[in-house]
Image (spheres, helix red, strand yellow):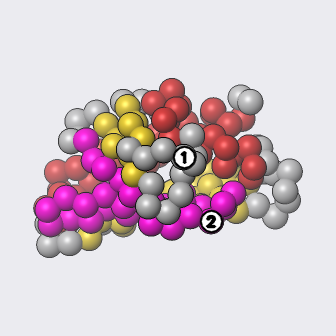
Amino acid sequence: MRYETAVTIDASPQTIWTVLVDIESWPDMTPSIKRVERLDDGPLAVGARARVHQPRLPAAVWTVTELEPHTSFIWEARTPGVTTVAGHIITASNPNGPATVRFTLDQTGPLAPLLSLFTGRLSRGYVDLEARGLKTQTESL
């Protein structure tokens, strides 16, 4: 399964980045996240891990695999038979904003088609909620 959505936010990329990487505050931003537990100290960086609890889904440990400060981070969660990769990419032509944030979700592996049958709609809805929540949270600052 592949899903992608984007939202334009009336804020600077720096402001968006600050809100986006504060992953422990995501439950305040969106109903698609119940709790985020950082498993490592320090700022979000490649190799950093977090346990994310979402309604109607088992908790998953996400590991940051790519990070370009103030621009993007990609993380992945692995379960038997499925690897889920989620991207968060900020683009702007002006350092003062507005900026567009693109959210991507890719699920691969032998069980990915089966998982998509059962949770695909829910997962896509969660990505949409996260995009809208980031916009609302960031624009309210």
Task: Report whether residue 124 is seen.
Answer: no
Split into 4 quadrants, where in the image is the N terminus?
A: bottom left
**In the rendered image, which residue does mark 2 sit on?**
68
Q: Is residue 63 above or below residue 134?
A: below
Q: Is residue 98 above or below residue 93?
A: above
Q: Magenta: predominant secondary structure element?
A: strand
Viewer-proximal residue among 73 and 91? 73
Percent position (x, y) of residue 98? 78, 50
Q: Is residue 110 above or below residue 55?
A: below
Number of the label disc, if any, that sits on residue 9: none
Find the magenta span and give its range.
Answer: 59-88
Split into 4 quadrants, where in the image is the C terminus?
A: top right
Question: What kind of element bears circle 2?
Answer: strand
Q: Is residue 18 above or below residue 28?
A: below
| Residue 124 falls inside the magenta stretch | no
Identify the amino acid type marked 1.
Gly
Among the two numbered marks 2 and 1 on one chain, the one whose residue lies closer to the N terminus: 1
**What residue is drawn where x is 45% and y is 54%?**
48
**In the rendered image, which residue does mark 1 sit on?**
42
**What residue is drawn where x is 22% and y is 50%?**
119
